[in-house]
Image: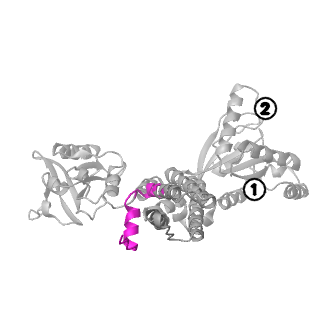
Amino acid sequence: MNEVQKGNIICATATSGGGAIALIRVSGKGAVETLAEIFQPIDKEIDVSKAKGYTLIYGTISSHGELIDQVLISVFRAPHSYTGEDMVEISCHASPFIQRRIIEILIEKGVKTASPGEYTMRAFMNGKMDLSQAEAVADLIAADSEAAHRLAVSQLRGGFSEGIEKLRQELITFASLIELELDFSEEDVQFANRFAMTGTVIKTKDMVDRLASSFRLGNAIRNGIPVVIAGRPNVGKSSLLNVLLQEERAIVSGIPGTTRDTIEEVLHLGGFLFRFIDTAGLRQAGDEIEELGIERTHIKLRAASIVLAVAEATDTAESIVRLAAGIDEIMGNSEARVIVIVNKSDLITRSAASALKRELRNLCSCPALFVSARDSSGIEEIRKELISSVETGRLDNPQYIVTNARHYEALKNVSDSLQRVLDGFRDGIPTVLIATDVRQAIYYLGQITGRITPDDILGEIFSKFCIGK
């Protein structure tokens, strides 16, 4: 156990309001003994201070002869607890007064109130989980869709950490060979073929780049997939939002420019959380307020994962293609998927609709869906297209999807370091400089899981080679 944590007992309520029962956690060396001072078991023969782990005891909590509540305590002994320390969980009635009073009594006994995330921090410090798993705890609590839950559970189980650790071990082995060459540089000894080394670096870098490329998807799933509804004024963007949500969320009016600001709502589809954003119509602004709304539309478009480019069925194919191209131009280098929505299809004949579909297939690379927000026709096709727009295939291996910006930044740094290694091999850079870049890559991988140990490379060398010199 980390020295800093010894004797430092913390407590906090671990449940949110609204239920009948609340849970108060007490963790740290001496937690069980401290609780024994304020808890009286119904069974008088039980010595709480000597209770074994995984024990449930029913009794009361009192202070100066005042009964506070009848409670059930769960005893956990180090290292077999969430934090890796001795820990007690108090199940009491959820009255705010009772919870506050129990915590006050614990504080009187020298227990400190826990700071945000301190239980999980202690779990990390005591080796119960690595950093990426600790971060997954917060993601699991915040998960508001099936896909986000799956990603968080996978990372909490250590799937992502195992992949990162495998990459790290490969680089440690690689670095140990380079370090050996440096140790024996005066004897002109080469411990590995440069061609084989280059292949190892390329393989590792490819894997790192694939992980980094998954961040856009992982971040969208974690926070909700942003879907921007864009188009000219009065093409039915707000009506489309209302029918997708099945509620009157946005004001619908025949007056152009009604939507001045962005309107955001969420919808669960196929296990994913989509964040729909209705925007101001794309046109030359009529006044300063509308101009601000259009500027916000541009900002939302650049941050979107999916764009529903809404046009009217009475528009020409050329004008619809120009709309999609204009949205592409606003988005710049964004990887967002554009789906053309041809609304008000009830205003044209079937033959006219078929002709327009043929033209759009020839002129536009984006999928085009014909719908009518007025009678809700074609809406189910939009829902299916939204779900298919998500890279669902990657979810078959959720441990290889990056959801955390810190992990993404670290992976980009690893990739840059490995690219310098490849450039060094190609340009004949001295081994000592190449070794520096490899060590940096190992360091950045270690940042993800929290395993940044400078002795790793030395340990790898001495475990596999008999130096003897």
**Residue 179 position within the rendered picture, expressed as x and y whole percent measured from the top left:** 45, 63
Q: How many marks?
A: 2
CA separation in Å, label 1 and label 2: 31 Å
Residue found at x 8% / y 65%: 45
Name the side, left or right, on which 335 lies relative to 71. Answer: right
Q: Dot 1 surroundings within 10 Å: few (below 14), some, or many (20 or more)?
A: some
Identify the image quadrant of the N terminus: bottom left
**Residue 109 position within the rendered picture, expressed as x and y whole percent measured from the top left:** 15, 46
| 460 within the magenta span | yes
Inspect the image, locate mark 1, and give the three-letter code of the amino acid beneath it: Ser
Q: Secondary structure at mark 2?
A: loop
Mark 1 or 2: the one toward you: 2
Question: From what the image shows, is residue 370 above or below residue 186?
Answer: above
**Residue 381 position within the rendered picture, expressed as x and y whole percent measured from the top left:** 72, 59
Label ID, residue 284: 2
Instruction: Say which residue label 1 marks.
Output: 377
Which residue in the rendered view is the most extreme toward the front?
186
**Quick check: can you spot residue 199?**
yes
Residue found at x 63% / y 43%: 249
Q: Earlier in the sequence, mark 1 or mark 2?
A: 2
**Quick check: can you spot residue 42?**
no
State the image quarter where residue 447 is shown: bottom left
Q: Which residues are magenta?
A: 443-469
* 239 and 85: which is toward the camera: 85
State the image quarter where residue 27 is shown: bottom left
Q: Secondary structure at mark 1?
A: loop
Inspect the image, locate mark 2, and give the three-letter code of the amino acid beneath it: Gln
